[in-house]
Image (cartoon, helix red, strand yellow):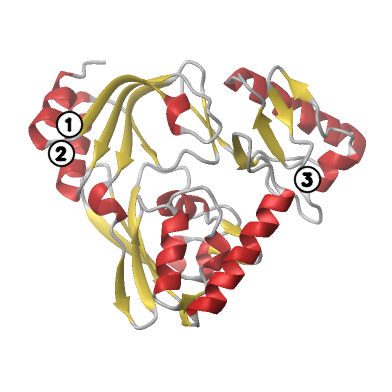
Amino acid sequence: MDFHLIDSTCKECGCDLLKNEPMQYHTTFKIGGPADRFITVYHEQQLKKILQAAKESDIPFFILGKGSNLLISDKGISGIVLHLDGDFKKMKWTSPTSIYIPAGASLAAASRFACEQELTGFEFAWGIPGSVGGALYMNAGAYGGEMAHIVTSVTYITPVGEILTASGDELQFAYRKSMFTGTNLIILGAELNLKHGISSEIQALMDDLMNRRKSKQPYDMPSAGSVFKRPEGHYASALIEESGLKGTACGDAMVSPKHAGFIVNNGEANCEDVLNLIELVKKTVWDKKQVHLECEVKVYGR
């Protein structure tokens, strides 16, 4: 691939550019080989120019949020990794019960912002280690809440630079899916419809949910969150635990002894270790429980 146009465009429009950047520095799993180009963009015009340069150069791109729910190949990523910063993190209050949250904002920051505006309904996202864009992409949820319950519209940009808005049924929200899943549409941000609340009560609920997460999940170890989708009529973590897999390891990838739904990096795990362990878990659960587990973590790279 010829990156001449990409490199010159970054220089001209003021994007930050890193070459052969190890992705282990940008994922919660702390796993991943080098990306050819890691580009941080700060506003829509920069993003449009980089997308145009990528199109003209026939170079693929990948949007990276907080790097959670993601497993990157040990061989890295061909093409461009785009990271949204600057304007893509600037949240605003749009009506008495609505806020606009850009894709680059973390779910933690967005939850805190909603609390500060005395708006309730977004507490479930407190503690999910991802970005708003990633949460919209996969309709993230926890503790009875999910993005589909509070999103009224999503603004996005196409690979050719056209900015559009989708709302209602157009968003195609389902369990861990949206209209954006599996596409190359880039989410810019979303309008959230919440309810009036009392900030102290909202904060108390957020604290309670965080304490519950920390008591049950391996917060102190690198992971990509819950590895498997919830099979109909079952809980993946229960099936894995009942199959005797807690603590099972492939290399330095290990089924968490604290929560069987998590695979953790126990030191120097690589992508191959994790993939081998995922297959071992799937096979064992099928053999013992006759239930098929589907991976929720997105695997990407060479």
Q: CA distance from mark 2 to mark 1?
A: 6 Å
Task: Work out whether residue 67 or residue 116 is closer to the camera in this orientation and state it.
Answer: 116
Q: Which residue is mark 1?
A: 53
Residue shown at 82% from the left, 34% from the top:
246
Please name the amino acid that badge 2 sits on.
Answer: Lys
Please determine whether, in this image, residue 130 is positioned above or below residue 16: below
Q: Is residue 272 above or below residue 191?
A: above
Q: From the viewer's perspective, is residue 150 above or below residue 132?
A: below
Q: Nearer the viewer, mark 3 or mark 2?
A: 3
Residue 1 visible in image: yes
Under mark 3, the amino acid is Ser
Question: Percent position (x, y) of residue 92?
Answer: 29, 68
Numbered circle sitting on residue 49: 2
Q: Residue at x 68, y 24 (%)?
A: 253
Instruction: Tell me which label, 3 or 2, sits earlier in the chain.
Output: 2
Task: State which mark lies toward you, 3 or 1.
Answer: 3
Cα gap from disc 3 to disc 2, whole angstroms: 44 Å
